[in-house]
Amino acid sequence: MAWSIAEVARMSKVTSRTLRHYDEIGLLPPAWIGSNGHRYHEEADLLRLQQILLMRELDLGLREIQAVLDSRRDQVAVLREHQQRLLAGRDRLATLARTVGRTIAELEEGRDNGKMTKINKPENLFEGFQAPSEAEAVVRERWPQAWEQTRQAVEAMTSDDTERWQREVTAQMIRMAEFMVAGTPVSDPA
């Protein structure tokens, strides 16, 4: 069975313009082009598009995606890797959601008691954030110049600078949580 580019766009929620771009760069050529000039995709193309969209969700660039798809790796193995990354991301987001929920509860408790907000365990504010080594590896790979500039700036910081920076970050996290509790729209200039 074959589907027109319009049908594929509707099913995948990808614009037909994007699908044509993927064709132009060789990422997703159609199975065939009709005498009317319309592009048609078959089942294998839909599976390839799913992989493209999964890798886009994982923030891979189109060149990286092309390299992965052209490597002729086993489709099931590639999909299993995607699934593992997605599950790990889901778990990380669930932990972050619990962290924000806990912060909101503590802020609401302080507000309801008419007392100043007091965080019971400040370390809980940061549960679920990536360990520096994981985050560093990602940043170092994707943005090497920015990583090097940041590394140099951090190395130049004194212990007082580091302590001041940590206090500022904690204060910003508390302020963000207070905005969330108050229902402040993200478009509101804080």
Image: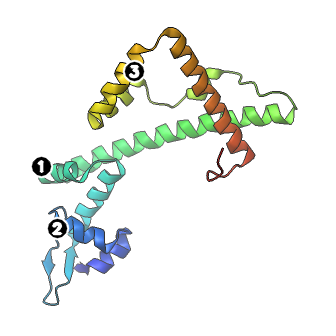
Residue 58's x, y, as percent? 34, 47
Q: Secondary structure at mark 1?
A: loop
For label 3, the crowd category at 10 Å Cα-Cα, with few meaning under 14, some 14 to 19 and many 20 or more, is few
Which amino acid lies under the numbered mark 1 shown in the image of this protein? Ser
> Which residue is at a point 72% across and 43% down the rendered structure image?
181
> Which residue is at a point 74% across and 31% down the rendered structure image?
106
Identify the residue under disc 1: 71
Locate residue 72 relative to residue 101 in the image: left or right.
left
Residue 118's x, y, as percent? 75, 24
Which numbered disc, 2 or 3, marks the residue closer to the eye? 3
Which amino acid lies under the numbered mark 3 shown in the image of this protein? Ala
**Quadrant where the N terminus lies?**
bottom left
Q: State whether residue 83 is above or below residue 143.
A: below
What label does residue 92 carry, if any? none
Q: Residue furthest right?
A: 114
Locate residue 122 relative to residue 130 in the image: left or right.
right
**Quadrant where the C terminus lies?**
top right
